[in-house]
Image (cartoon, rainbow, N blue to C red):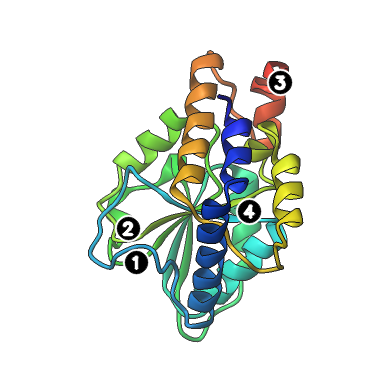
Amino acid sequence: MGTLEILIAIFIPAGVTVVLFYTMKKQREAASQGILNPTIKKKETINTVVKDLVFASHAEREKYLLEISKMHDTNIIAWFESDLNYLNGLFGGNWNHSTVKVYLHASLAASEINPDIPMVLWGRHPLASVEDKALAALPKVQLLVGMTSLDDALIQHFGGDKVKSLIGKMGHKEGEIIEHSMISASIRNAQEDLDKKVENPISANSASDWFLLNANHLKK
């Protein structure tokens, strides 16, 4: 079963649908309380398993991150220069109660990271190998969250518009977040699939350029 089929299958069974909407509600309530991710235990250390929060759009992801960052010190990893510049512009102002630091994965030093501060991945890198190498170089952080949008190039490559249409039909409300282990597994499968198919990947300034240079020809 392909990644798109796996994602679609998540939303069909009634039992899973109930779980997803319960999770959306928990995430929304947690955000109002300044909690980054209520499904992660405080003492859990995870660098190889990323908890994915999936948003229907870039705008919803950005709004959530801005709200959380007013309450939490936050480290953010950007995979591409364009995202680094965008995030630095977004957090150019000074928050009253938090510090936000944005790092480009390729130049990130472990000594710069406080493991007690939540680590956010701004989207997911197209290749699992690149992501694994970056995360393996970091100290074990207590909270590692991938904030992914259905508009991200990785998700779009595997049929993000169809998934967005499905969650719309399910009654998705603005600001609700989807989080499920099967979604995280599907994202990982997509990354590993690209790792197998993309030989000698070409560096790019943005995720969309990366797919243009490396993977658009792989679409069926």
Dot 3 corresponds to which residue?
219
| Amino acid type of the residue that numbered disc 1 sits on in the rendered structure | Ile
Label at residue 85: 4
In the image: residue 22, left or right of residue 85: left
Tell me if label 3 and label 2 are in contact, CB under 8 Å.
Answer: no
| Amino acid type of the residue that numbered disc 3 sits on in the rendered structure | Lys
Locate residue 54, reporting x and y percent. 58, 54
Label at residue 113: 2
| Amino acid type of the residue that numbered disc 2 sits on in the rendered structure | Ile
Closer-to-camera residue (117/22): 22
Determine the CA span between mark 2 and mark 4: 20 Å
Could you tell me which residue is drawn at 62 percent across and 45 percent down? 12
Tag 1 secondary structure: loop
Could you tell me which residue is drawn at 63 percent across and 53 percent down? 85
User: Can residue 206 be seen here?
Assistant: no
In the image: residue 177, left or right of residue 145: right
In the image: residue 59, left or right of residue 198: right
